[in-house]
Image: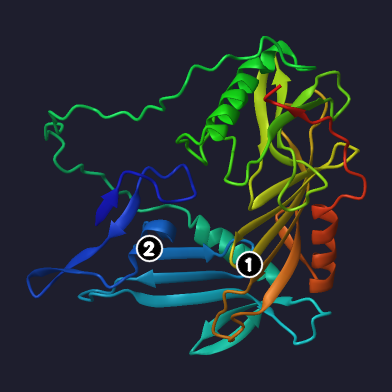
Amino acid sequence: MLLKKTNDYDDEDRAFSIDSIYTIKDGKAVPVLVSPFWLSKFAILAADGTFFRAESYHNAGCADLYSYRLDAGAAELTLLTEYHASLRFSEDPDTVPVPYWYKVVDGKNVEITEKEFNALEAKYRNPGEQMELTFLPIDVDAPAPTTTEEPTTTKIISQPIEYPACHKDAPKAYKPILDDLYRMDQIIRRDEPRDELDWRGDTYITEFVRSLGYAVVDINHDGIPELLLLTKESPYNPKEPFIHSLFTLKDDQPVNVGYYWGRHRGHLAADGTIYTRGSGGGSCTTLGSFKLKPGAAELTQLTEYESDYFPGDDTNNAGFPYFFKLVDGKNQYITEKEFWALCEKYENPAKPMKLNFIPIEQ
């Protein structure tokens, strides 16, 4: 077996993952026919030589369980067991999909209970004693590569910038952030090169920037003023500023607790709730609501909703849209009408927080 020291598993306890398997056939080394992706990502090799595979799709309401063995003299794995969790859909948009669970026996689907499936999934993800594998590194004594090339650096050449001496209403601890925002504003105005999507590492300034500024407001009434980096008019709703980042103070140091961009927008309600709407690409839309608890340095998530298209299985359900609320790690399915009503609410809070926009150029 070829192993990778870097761990492809979600389980951090595993020191390495299996990349590929070879066996001897007619005196020659031949690869065992198996998908490298699921092998490295999902396969667990038990002490008795059984491969267990538990694969689930992110919040899609479906999961697959398999077990395999490599028979004596064979060059491909033999499938031993197969279980699935899936959804039943209706053509009626006012109905929600119904989850069900089944095993495949002699090519036929035999339904089982959710309790049975969950017990099997736990077993397949942790089958007990695993086969002991010794990782042998290749070229452990190989010298490190050397180069005579001079390192290259990219510098932004600009005119000297005179920073403001103070910032209105902002605690002194926020000054370095506002200094950077001021410099970014000047660079944009001069149309100089800049890194569009990695300013300060986790604060996003994008192409639609028109007028950069900020607001200072205590959103959770704990006596610690928060700092919001803004664009004066959002391209998605000109009546409100676009929020780029949200900072608070912890031990007198600024902490970034939220950052937003075109495909992950944040909206601040009058009661301090932050509503977000995001896109994972294609059909995936996500909604969330958050609160900054008094004295906290991170947001607490209150709600989570998502839409997507079902990836499909052997029941030919591929392409059906589904919508759900995530509660305690489980999907609670809702109708399409309910979901889009929530989208409107999250994108346009009934009572937005009033923000005193201060242009950074001042």
**Up-down: is 330 above or below 319?**
above
What colour-coding does the image apply? rainbow
| Mark linked to residue 72 | none
Near-viewer residue (178 or 360): 360
* Image coordinates for residue 14, horizontal then vertical, percent: 41, 45
Q: Residue at x 47, y 76 (%)?
A: 81
Quarter of the rendering occupied by the C terminus: top right
Q: Is residue 312 above or below residue 289?
A: below
Amino acid on which disc 1 is placed = Ala
Residue depicted at 41% across the width and 25% down the height: 157
Q: Earlier in the sequence, mark 1 or mark 2?
A: 2
* Residue 37's disc number: 2
Residue type pointed to by label 2: Phe
Q: Name the residue nearer the viewer: 330 or 133.
A: 330
Question: Label 1 vs label 2: CA separation?
Answer: 19 Å
For image coordinates 20% across by 42% down, the residue present is 137
Q: Residues within 10 Å of mark 2 (few under 14, many from 20)?
A: few
Label 1 close to label 2 by CB (< 8 Å):
no
- Which residue, given by chain and number where applicable, does mark 1 sit on? 60
How far across and how far down the image is residue 201, in percent? 52, 33
State whether residue 46 appears in this view: no
Q: Quadrant of residue 221?
A: top right
Secondary structure under the numbered disc 1 in the rendered image: loop
